[in-house]
Amino acid sequence: MKAKFTYEIKPSKRRKSVAITIDENGQIVVKTPLNYDTKLINTLIEKHSDWIKEKLKKFQRKDPKTVKRKFINGEGFLYLGDWFELKIQGNQNEPLIIKDYFYLSEKYKQNAKEVFINWYRKQAERIFVERINIYSKNLEVYPKKIKLSNAKKRWGSCSSKGYVNLNWRLVMAPIRVIDIDYVICHELVHLQEPNHSQKFWTKLKILMPDFEKQKEWLKENGHLLYLLDR
């Protein structure tokens, strides 16, 4: 019996081939070139049905607390790769970490998501600057400006003006399971090598020999770095 899947088609004039992905909500997305014959998609889906089923199983095994948030006592929140259990108590003005717990004042319970985001962004700004300074010295390249990004799917980017944009959600990831450092190094190398050429990957590997491991971690665990409340 053939497996039946529902999926979303996303055509793009920039795409030359077809790709099947599972997004952060567990939705199958088929990315195609413009004017692609959609009758071929069902055949493609069937051909890769085993891969799709395995990816969907992984998504379904995720801890529900990391997919949807209620901002209540007992929920887990990531910071620099460690989990902290939320306790709503105290009268502090922002989330406070003590040992294994994230403390949030009762008065901020109604707008907990906004309070958490503001706190994460503040930590991200400080930590990103510290990490960029370390790798900039090694690479001898310095961004003209560092900006926090709120992009849904991109962890980092850089511009021709020398600006580096980093997603604030990365502050939830480990530093030396290095997803913060991996994205930072990736974008710093782009300041010298705009394209993903062999020269780019060679420079990145010199700067971070185990970047492939960190890239894979982010691919497999990136869904954890969101504060979804829907």
Image: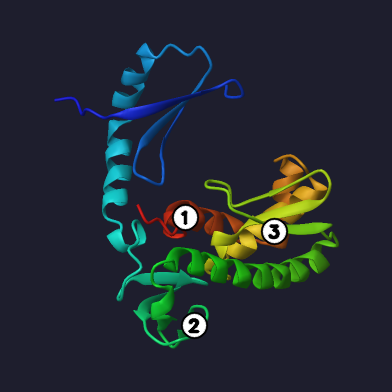
- In x, y percent, where is residue 178? 58, 66
Identity of the residue drawn at 37% across and 14% down? 40
Which quadrant would residue 41 be assigned to in this image?
A: top left
Q: Residue at x 70, y 41 (%)?
A: 196
Q: Which residue is mark 1?
A: 222
Viewer-nearest of labels 1 and 2? 2
- Do the residues under discs 1 and 3 have CB atoms within 8 angstroms? no
Callout 1, which amino acid? Gly
Which numbered disc flags the more N-terminal residue, 3 or 2? 2
| Mark pair 1, 2: CA separation | 24 Å
Q: Secondary structure at mark 1?
A: helix
Q: Amino acid at mark 2?
A: Leu
Please state the horizontal and vertical placement of residue 184, each as a whole percent of the image: 68, 59
User: Is residue 203 something that shows in the picture?
Assistant: no
Query: Is label 3 in a helix, a strand or a loop?
Result: helix
Give the tally of numbered discs: 3
Please report whichever mark, 1 or 3, sits nearer to the chain's N-terminal start.
Answer: 3
User: What residue would you read off at disc 3?
Assistant: 185
Image quarter for residue 75?
bottom left
Horizontal and vertical percent position of residue 204: 70, 54
